[in-house]
Amino acid sequence: MLDIAFAKAVLPKTGVVVVPLAEGAALSGQALALDKACAGALKRAIDAAAFTGKKGSQVNLPAPTAGLRRVLLLGTGKAGALTPRRAEELGGALAAALARESEALLLAEDLSPPLAAHLALGARLRAYKFEKYRTTLEDDEKARLAKLTILGADPAKSRAAYTPLAAVAEGVELTRDLVTEPANVLYPAEFATRLEGLKKLGLKIEVFDRKALEKLGFGSMLSVSWGSAREPRMVVLQWLGASGATGAEGKKPKKPKAPIAFIGKGVTFDSGGISIKPAAGMEDMKWDMAGAGAVAGVMAALAGRKARVDAIGLVGLVENMPSGSAVRPGDVVKSYSGQTIEILNTDAEGRLVLADVLYYAQARFAPRYMIDLATLTGAIIVGLGHEYAGLFSNSDELSGKLIAAGQAVGEELWRMPLAAPGESYDKNLKSAIADMQNIGGGRAGGSITAAQFLQRFVNGKPWAHLDIAGMAWAAKDLPTTPKGATAYGVRLLDRLVADHFEGDPAAP
């Protein structure tokens, strides 16, 4: 984790210094004083490199004085055009450029406290590393940037603006850790144990084991786990920030009032079951629990920043493996809703997990909105690539709020078609022997028919399904995300709550 500090602007005399400069702007304030201390080296470098301050452009000056190790000029783009999202991208560029430094100072006199805070957030997110299992590292692989100090005009205000963002960053880091873990380490019971550790944030945590799920009648979800030696779990996380209650020991939480519910698919490893996947790339299926990971992260973020909202997180945790006891193509199971499902493809398992958890969420908590996240279909990657997650919803209002929140934080959504029950795409789920089958009639529209299946378990409740299969893992470094687990959804849902659902729990 990158340590972020805020301090009063002073002239640095030692260490590594970052000087942000807007397009066409001249050096001023402490940056101008720094140039004088370097005998005009900054201005000469600007002229020699034709540095204009274009967004993301950089000029590096090694050892400009006996005391300074390095000065990095960082272009911030057109004056007045810096937004929180762009500030985060600049912070990410800073962290990437200084990856081999241990500490750095940023001259931020010209940045408002909110922009300084968002720049710090971007740097922290980009500096994330998962090196838990590395026993040897090359020098250029070591995560060395440990501290960033931002020198500004009002460090107290910057620190106050960063505090809630730091809680969100902790949620993102939690999710990235969970998604990156190998499946032999993070299986359903271990996942549940880690979530129990979030009680320290004031979350109420309930864990349902196999026997409890059998008693509830979770026939759809449990069928996915039949072939695995790892037993399933469902975990319910409650943050009652609007009702004024927490999960503190010895206190009985109040009942949430019209909460917002987040539901996550948590398949800790997906072999495909009897409908087994090809060997190539199967190792990636350790992150088929990224939806559950995102739910864990956003609940931790809301609790960490003491959000004034009643929110419920529910995750269904299973491992999908082939064995003599595994569910077979052609089997029929009874879901928690009472509806029966003919399973034609055991690799269409995520929807079987979500079906029971979605229905349980509304039956128990009567949420005003439900949002599920799942790495549900490869078809969504065919349709949208790795630029957008697919959004399916029965609510125009909720869809609009989600899309706006995603644009604000750089976690984009693209709305996809969803038919009314019994119409067009939905007809493809008709089974000859059960209430429905778990796949459509062919490959066409696979992401849509998967969403249609889920819609059968929401009873018209305002709901959105986010298919994040193309967004959960990055194959290359992104502005604020290093290659690997992205924690897509954590910041999007936190922003949704912050913009629309904090305050009066009965407000629409």
Image (cartoon, rainbow, N blue to C red):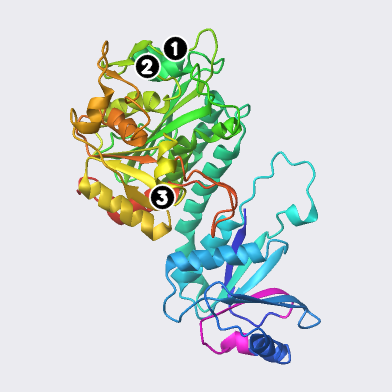
Residue farthest to the top?
324
Q: How many marks?
A: 3
Q: Is residue 124 left or right of residue 369?
A: right
Q: Which SS class for mark 3?
A: loop
Residue 141 higher or lower than 162, as above or below: above
Q: Is residue 203 left or right of residue 65?
A: left
Q: Which SS class for mark 2?
A: loop
User: Label 3, label 2: how many angstroms apart (C-alpha)?
Assistant: 29 Å
Task: Please tell me how crowded label 3 is: few (under 14), some (14-19), or many (20+) other residues with Cα within 10 Å.
Answer: many
Q: Are marks 2 and 1 in contact (CB under 8 Å)?
A: yes
Type of residue at label 3?
Tyr
Q: Which residues are magenta?
A: 13-32
Q: Which residue is mark 1?
A: 328
* The stretch drawn in magenta includes residue 28: yes
Q: Is residue 306 visible?
A: no
Q: Which residue is mark 3?
A: 388
Residue 53 image offset from top left, x and y in percent: 55, 81
User: Label 3, label 1: how many angstroms apart (C-alpha)?
Assistant: 33 Å
